[in-house]
Amino acid sequence: MSGQLRRAGRKERIALRKAKPAFDPCPPGQIGGAYKPLSEAELNAIFDTALRLLETLGLGEVPERLRRDLEAVGAKSNANGRVCFPARLVHQAIDQSAKTFALHGRDSARSIEVGLNRVHFGTGGAAVQTLDLETRRYRPSTLRDLHDFTRLQDTLTNVSWYTRCCVATDVPDNYDLDVNTAYALLRNTTKPVATSFTLASHVAPIVEMLDIAAGGQGRFSERPFLKAHISPIISPMRFGEDAVEVVYECIRHNIPMSCITAAQAGATAPATMAGFLAQSLAETLASLVMVHAIQPGFPMVFSNWPLVVDLRTGAFAGGSGETALLNAASAQVSNWLGLPSGVACSMTDAKAIDAQYGMEKGLTSLAAALAGGNLIYESSGMTASLLGASFEAFVLDDEMHSNTYRILRGIEVSEENLGYEAIVESVLGEGHFLGGFHTYAAMERDYFYPSLADRSEPRSWAEGGAKDAWDRAHSKVRDLLATHNPEYLTPEQDAEIRTRFNILYPA
Amino acid sequence: MSGQLRRAGRKERIALRKAKPAFDPCPPGQIGGAYKPLSEAELNAIFDTALRLLETLGLGEVPERLRRDLEAVGAKSNANGRVCFPARLVHQAIDQSAKTFALHGRDSARSIEVGLNRVHFGTGGAAVQTLDLETRRYRPSTLRDLHDFTRLQDTLTNVSWYTRCCVATDVPDNYDLDVNTAYALLRNTTKPVATSFTLASHVAPIVEMLDIAAGGQGRFSERPFLKAHISPIISPMRFGEDAVEVVYECIRHNIPMSCITAAQAGATAPATMAGFLAQSLAETLASLVMVHAIQPGFPMVFSNWPLVVDLRTGAFAGGSGETALLNAASAQVSNWLGLPSGVACSMTDAKAIDAQYGMEKGLTSLAAALAGGNLIYESSGMTASLLGASFEAFVLDDEMHSNTYRILRGIEVSEENLGYEAIVESVLGEGHFLGGFHTYAAMERDYFYPSLADRSEPRSWAEGGAKDAWDRAHSKVRDLLATHNPEYLTPEQDAEIRTRFNILYPA
C-alpha cells in the first residue's frame, strides 16, 4: 500500500477518533450566492420599479432637517410635499456607499467583515417573552434574561454579532432600558454588538458608557464595536422622525448602522412578491440616500427584511416559505447592487422547540444563506414569530448554522480531492475506504461533527431516556450558564459606569 | 378608490377568509435548479474523472450475461477481468437514454413526468422499525404498518410516488414479503408506486398480480404504474449479480427502474467530496451503460444518492450538512448531463419528532430541491437514519414540502405583480394594503396556508395545551387513519389475487 492509503493501527485510529478536530471545518463567513432566485431581467425590473417609485412617488413625512440635507444633494419636493429622488441621486448614493466594512468586536479577534458574498448569522430580536427554562411556558422577558442570553451566546461560535434578543420588560423607563441594555452587552460579551436607541438623546450618554469600556473618552468612536439598529422608514414610503434623529446622532458618534426596512407583505406593502420587493427596495434605498445626504460613505448595512403576514389572521408569519423566498431574493438584490445585505431569517412561528421550529428555521435560514445574505438577523434564539426568545433555541440554532455553513463551504474540486489514484488503489486493494489516512484527513478537514444531534440507533436512544433535542439543548444550556460567567468589564470600569448610570443589575 | 383597491365589505372579507383556496399555490413538480453548488469547470472535472474511472479502472464482478451484452456495445474486459467502458460508449448511453418519461399512476390523474428541472418528493425507504403511535418508541415494522402507511400517504399531496417505506418484518419469507408488499400498494393507493424485488424470479408472478389490478393479462406492461428500485452496483465499482438479474427481468416486463447508487462517503467511496462524486457518478453511469446495453432508451431514473457515514462511529448520518450538499451536487450533475436525477434527501438522524428532525429535514430537502433533484427519495415519513418510519412524520413532511415547493415556485415578476400603480394608490390613499382586492387575489393565488404549523401567540398556544408539532401531527394521523380506508381493488380483483397468492393481510 502506498503512504496515502497506509492503514492506521488500532491505537492510532482510536486516538484520531477521540482527537478534537484541529479547526472548525465550517466557520462563519462562508461564501453564499450559489442560489439565485431571480434572473438578471427580474432584478432589473424590480430595481427599475424601485427607482420609479423613488423618482415619482417619493417619501412622505420627511423631517425638515433631513429634507434640507436631501435637497442639497439633488432630491426634489413635489406638490404633495413628498421628497423625490432622481435616479441619478440614487445611483450616486449606491456608488459612494460603503461596500464592505468591519463590525469590530471589543476583542478584535471577534471582529467580522460585512459585504461581498460572505454570510454571517447573528441576532436582532426584541422579544418581549422568554421561554422559561423551568416551566417551558412563555413569561415576560427580564433584565436577568438579557444578561443570561448575552453570556450564553458569548460561548456560541455562530452568533457572529449580538443584538439584544429580548427587551427587559421589567425596566419601564425608556432611558434606563437603553442604558441597562448597553450595560448587559458590555459586561457579558466582547463580540461585535448592536442595540437600539429609543431616542436620539440617549445616544450621547450611552457613548460615554461605551467610552469607559473602550478605555477613555473618544476611544469608542475611533473603533466602534457597537452598531445601531434603526428603522428610519415606516412602510409604506414615509420617514419616521424619531428614528431619523437617531440616525443623525449615530453618524455624529461614528456608530455604524443597520437601517432596517421591515415592511409586511399584504399589510404595509403589496402582497404580490414582486411588488413587495420593489417597494421595500425603494424604502431601503431611501435610507441609503438619507445616509448619503448626511455623510457619504458612512457604514450602513442595507437591511431589507421582507416580513410576511398570515392574511387569514393578520398575524406575522416568520417561518413561511414565502419568508424564505422573499428574504433570499432581498439578499440577492442587495448583493447585486453591491450593497452589504441584511435579511431576517431562521425565524419560526413555533412556540415549542419542536419539529415545526426546526423545519421553519431550516428552510428559512438555508434559503437566505445560499442566496448570500451578508448579515442574517434574527437567526438565533428567536421563537414565536419573534415574540419569544429561548435559551435552548440559541444552542440548537448554533449547531444548525454549522450545518448551513458546511453546505455553503461547498465542494473543493482539485486533483487531490478528486483522488483518482486513491480510488483505483482502494478498489483494487482492500475494496473500501475505511481507516485510511486519506479518509482521516478528509474527516478532520471537511466534516462537521454535531454535539446535540443524536445519531444513535433507536434502541440506544430509548435506553438513554428517549430524549429529544429540546431536552439535550436544555442540559447544554444549564451547563453553559453554570460555568460561563465572563466579566468583560474591569472592576474599575464597572464601578465608574455604576457611578454615572442607573445600573439595575446587581454588581 | 379604483376597482383594483376597492375595499371588501366585512361580510365579503369573512367569506373570503373562510373560503378554501381555489387551488394549491405550490403543487408538486415545481422547477428547481436555481441553486448551483458546482461551477461549470467543477462539473467537467468530476465528469472527466468519472469517465476516466470507467475507461481504465472499470467495473468488477460483472455477471457473464451482462459482460456479453456490454462487450456487444463496445465495452472491453481488461487483464484483471474488469469491464471497462470507453468514453464514447458512455456518451452514447447518455445520448440515447430516456431523458423524460412518465411515472404512471393507476389513476392517470396522479401520474407524474420525470425529468428536466421538475422536482417531486416521494418515498423510498425500507425502515425495519416503526415509531409506534401509542408508545412513541420504535418497534419492528409490520405488514399492518405497511398497509397503514400506504393508505395514510394516499391522502398526502406531496408524496408524488410511493415506495414501501417500511419492511414487513413479520413476513419472514422473501417471496411472501415481495408479494404482500405489492399487494399493500395495489390495495391502498392509485399513485405511481415502486417496490423492490429480492430475486429476479419474483418479478413475473408479481407482474401477474399487477395485471389483475390493471384489468387483464399484459395490461400492466402497456402502461406500467410500478417502478422497481434496484441497486445494481455495489460500491466501490462492482456489479451485484442478483440485482443485475432483476434488471433484466424488469426490462423484459417493461418496468421502469430507479437504478440506485448508494455509496457511503468514507466507507465505500472517498471521504473527499469531489472524489465521492466522481466515483458515484461513474457507478451510476455504469448502471446507465448496462441499461443501454440491454435495451437502449429504457426508462431509468439516474439515482445517484450520496450517503454519509459519521466517521467517529461508522453510523450512517442522513441529516448532515454534508448529505445536503452532496445530494444537491448529485442532482446538479445529473441534470447537467440531461439525465432524470434521483437523490435522497429530507432525511434525519433524529428518533424523536423534534427540533433536530425538523432542522435536518429542512436543510437537506431544501438543498436538494433548489438544486433541481427530479425525484427526491426518502423525503417523507423516514426517521432514525432511515432505520425508522413514522406516521406523524408523513403528515409533517407533507406540509414542509409545500413550503419548499412555495420557495421553488419563485417570484413572478410582471408589470401586474410589480404593481407600481397599486403601490402609488395605496400610499396616497389609505396608507396600507390590508383588505384590498389586489391583496386578496395575491393571498389566494400566491400564499401557502399551513394547517399543522402553529402561528398563534404564546398565550393562545399555552391555553390550547402547549401542544407541539408531534402532538398536532398525531391528531391528524388518527383522523386520517380513521376515515381514509380506500379499497382500490374491486372485490373480484381482490378475490382473484387471494386465490393465486398467499395474501397475509385480512380481506
Image (cartoon, coloured by chain):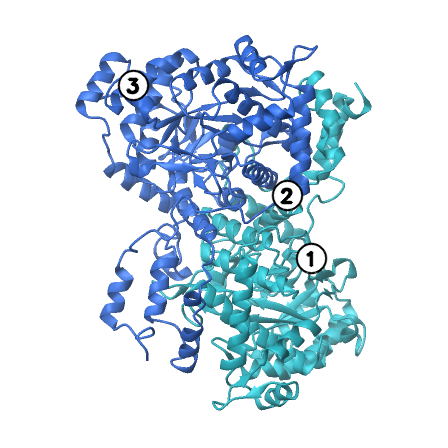
Chain colours: A cyan, B blue
**Amino acid type for the residue under numbered disc 2:** Leu
Distance in Å between CA atoms under marks 3 and 1: 75 Å
* Circle 3: element type: loop
Foreground tag (2 vs 1): 2
Foreground tag (3 vs 1): 3
Residue that label 2 marks: B38
Residue that label 1 marks: A485
Looking at the rendering, in which quadrant would you find the C terminus of chain B? top left
Task: Tell me which corner region of the image, top left, top right, bottom left or bottom right, holds residue A117.
Answer: bottom right
Residue that label 3 marks: B218
Q: Earlier in the sequence, mark 3 or mark 2?
A: 2
- Dot 1, crowdedness within 10 Å: few (<14), some or many (≥20)? some
| Subunit that carries the residue with mark 3 | B
| Subunit that carries the residue with mark 1 | A
* Circle 1: element type: loop
Foreground tag (3 vs 2): 3
- Dot 3, crowdedness within 10 Å: few (<14), some or many (≥20)? some
**Amino acid type for the residue under numbered disc 1:** Asn
Are callouts 3 and 2 both on one chain? yes
Distance in Å between CA atoms under marks 2 and 1: 44 Å
* Circle 2: element type: loop
Task: Tell me which corner region of the image, top left, top right, bottom left or bottom right, holds residue B263.
Answer: top right
